[in-house]
Image: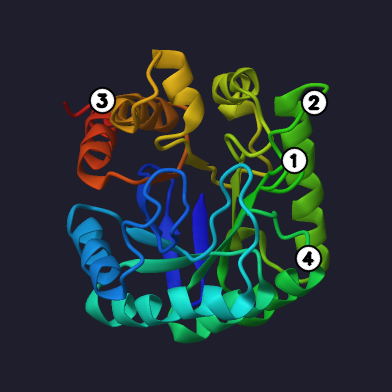
Amino acid sequence: MFWSFRNCVLDLSNHAVVMGVLNLTPDSFSDGGSWVDPDRAIAHGIQMHQEGAAILDIGGESTRPGATPVDEAEELRRVIPVIKALTTQTQALISVDTRKVSVARAALSAGATIVNDVSGLQDPQMRQLIRETRAGAIVMHMQGNPETMQNAPFYGNVATDIRRFFSDTLTLCQADGIAPDQLVFDPGIGFGKTATHNLRILKHLKDIRVSGRPLALGVSRKFFLGQLVGSAAMNDRSWPTVALTAYARHCGVSVIRVHEILKNVQSLQMTEAILEGVA
């Protein structure tokens, strides 16, 4: 349960880490437009790290359902200055949330050490970049693409299908010279999944791990939480997110991706105190 990349080794055997979401986009589903100003984004990233986010995940292209792609130049304009600043102004690990090899390469040169690829390292050039740079990578499962993924998602057995995807991708990565300990796997809650699919994934988190590699999970503020609690208000998705942070850690998830840091860090701390038997 070690995540090893570049000059960093995270021991995830007994403790999970919180990854803070920093969207530099005008159209993200949760906080679109909040952090488009670089100075505000940098200040928010610093605050998230101070509140306990070990990793800051910086994205310049929305991947919400129905989102249209952003061109390379615009994505670079959004993310690179913020990555450079947070690399020097915090001790946080910096992740870039991108599907583009060129953006990932520039981000890694600017100080990022992790690539969070919602397209799951299916691009051979992205795998080559991860091998060459020995960066960490999050392999996410997505059915379809952000523009169409929620049109009519279908699975034989969603947990089995995702585990097969993870296994096949791990094989591809190893064949391309990527060490397994560089990789973490994310089932992609809400990415080409219905609410029922999401619940089945959550119920079977322990069953989808491959080769002992850690899992990441991003459920923060997602639409299906509002469906389940019967509210369209974004604020009403906060406490369901906190509950799922505790549940995910109980199921062995190692990287928990959230927008609101402090309350989820506290949820994680409480859960780990119980699991360790020191409370």
Give left or right: position of 127 versus 2. right
Q: Is residue 46 above or below residue 216?
A: below
* Residue at figure coordinates x 44%, y 30% from the top left: 248
**How far across and how far down the image is residue 113, in percent?**
48, 73
Q: Are marks 1 and 2 in contact (CB under 8 Å)?
A: yes
Mark 3 → mark 4, Cα distance in angstroms? 41 Å
Q: Which of marks 3 and 2 precedes in the sequence?
A: 2
Frontmost of labels 3 and 4 is 4
Q: In the picture, which quadrant includes the C terminus? A: top left
Looking at the rendered structure, the kind of residue marked 1 is Gln
Looking at the rendered structure, the kind of residue marked 4 is Asp
Mark 1 → mark 3, Cα distance in angstroms? 36 Å
SS at badge 2: loop
Q: Which of marks 1 and 4 precedes in the sequence?
A: 4
SS at badge 3: helix
Crowding near pointer 3: few (<14 within 10 Å), some, many (20+)? few
Frontmost of labels 2 and 3 is 2
